[in-house]
Image (tube, helix red, strand yellow):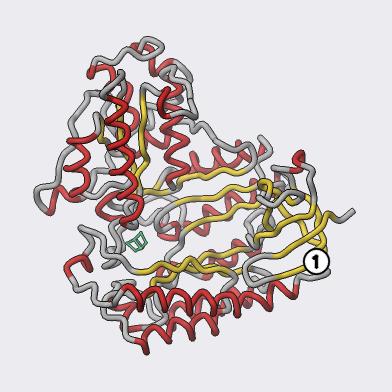
Amino acid sequence: MNISDSERVRAVIEGMGFKHTDKEEDAHLLGIISCSVRQKPIDKVYSRIHKWNKIKAKKNLFTFVTGCVLPDDKEKFLKLFDFVFEMSELNDFPNMLKEYGVASPVSLQDAFNTGIEINKTKSKSSNNNKFKPVKVAVNKKDIFPSNEHIFDLWHVKPNYQSDFEAYVPIQNGCNKFCTYCAVPYTRGREVSRPSGEIIDEVVSLMKNGYKSITLLGQNVNSYGFDCDDELSFAKLLEAIGKEGEKLGNTAWVYFTSPHPLDMTSDVIEAIAKYRVLAKQIHLPLQSGDNDVLERMNRKHDLNKYRESVNFIRELLPQATLFTDIIVGFTGETEEQFVNSMKAFDEFKYNMAYIAMYSPRPGATSYKWADDIPKETKKERYRRLSDKLEDVSLPYNKSLIGKVMKVLVRTTERKTGYLSGHTEGKIVTRIISKDKSLIGKFVQVKITEATGFSITSELAD
Ligand code: SF4
């Protein structure tokens, strides 16, 4: 989501005439797309802005922060940055700068005529682009960021940072309120992007040769729930599937993240039916214990999750399965943790993003005791990582000797190798020095496998 946001921020800034530089010291405008999911990225924001404010003492420099920011941090950031705004206010940024009295490389009068595509007719917001200082939360009502202007953000044509991989936001915000999570407080309530815009963007990407396209949202499979006359998520996938067929199925279309509660059979059926929809499912479990799931307010239990996985295995036997899981959630007993280990045995994940629980200010569980010692969290993290390696290895080994299509993404750190992934997002290092293959699909033969990756060589 932050990559996608940064592509739109960059489009607006470059539309004002600013040019990108790799050196912070050379910049006149520096900004951060923040992430509040864990504390570490927020700590980095503080260390970075202190560095920037030292540069600022010597030259004309303006700083901004946007993205996921919690109300408490927002209040502190207002004292440290020149601009603090929500992503939905991005279209106002040129005017904020103008009202601040900044001379940009081109006249900011023309900011909206320099390639930034803004479809004002579809916008649900007003056109008065006045700089409004960020509202600092003072009561419950103010805690939820307004998504009033999110439609304007989606009308900004992103400056894609890759010519073969792209991220397409389909929704913003979340209504689920998991007790450990700050997203509903940083991104507001769910708003679905009009399906016509999504399909147009995906079709345009496919026509331009993009190979990997990811539909983004905090809760993609509740897409359309906030509208009276919008497609369901399954219907949206079908529409994309049909467009993919017309264009010769030249890409892999992924989505992230769905919620197990809203995972319906028609979503799986659509993936099975259309070739362009990649056979890889990321289904966050978060805990393998029903009591912990209840305290997390996940609104689903193991049985509901199991039903979805069984249906995926039945309809998409070739699909890989990824998950997110938290270890050391407040009050998690050893027995409850072992239930997460058992879930790994049962669901045989191909990949899992394991996080050690950390309380997020503003989230409900922040008020609860963070009573699992750090050492215990680390130990559970290690045990679950080992378990992941065990359960993912047999699938990876089964690929040895097979010829598969992979997307080459980059070079490996070790010379003589490229890096890519299969349709199921199994990472492979490919024995080849041919950098011209980056961004292309190639056929490879799998030669070796570990729990977390496979090695391959180019096939004829
Ligand atoms: S579903 Fe839960 S974890 Fe995911 S964004 Fe919403 S509140 Fe956060």
Residue that protrudes farthest toward the bottom in the picture: 335
SS assignment at label 1:
strand
Image quarter for ligand 1 equals bottom left
Q: Residue at x 41, y 44 (%)?
A: 193
Q: Is residue 231 above or below residue 301?
A: above
In the visual, does 124 lie left or right of 117? left
Q: Residue at x 12, y 54 (%)?
A: 140
Say whether residue 149 is visible: no
Residue 330 appears at what percent x and percent y? 27, 75
Q: Is residue 170 above or below residue 459?
A: above
- Of residues 22 and 107, the one nearer the viewer is 22
Q: Which residue is mark 1?
A: 447
Residue 174 appears at what percent x and percent y? 33, 56
Q: Is residue 69 above or below residue 153?
A: below
- Of residues 309 and 444, the one nearer the viewer is 444
Residue 201 appears at what percent x and percent y? 54, 38
Say whether residue 396 is visible: yes
- Of residues 119 and 284, the one nearer the viewer is 284
Amino acid, disc 1:
Thr
In the visual, does 157 lie left or right of 458? left
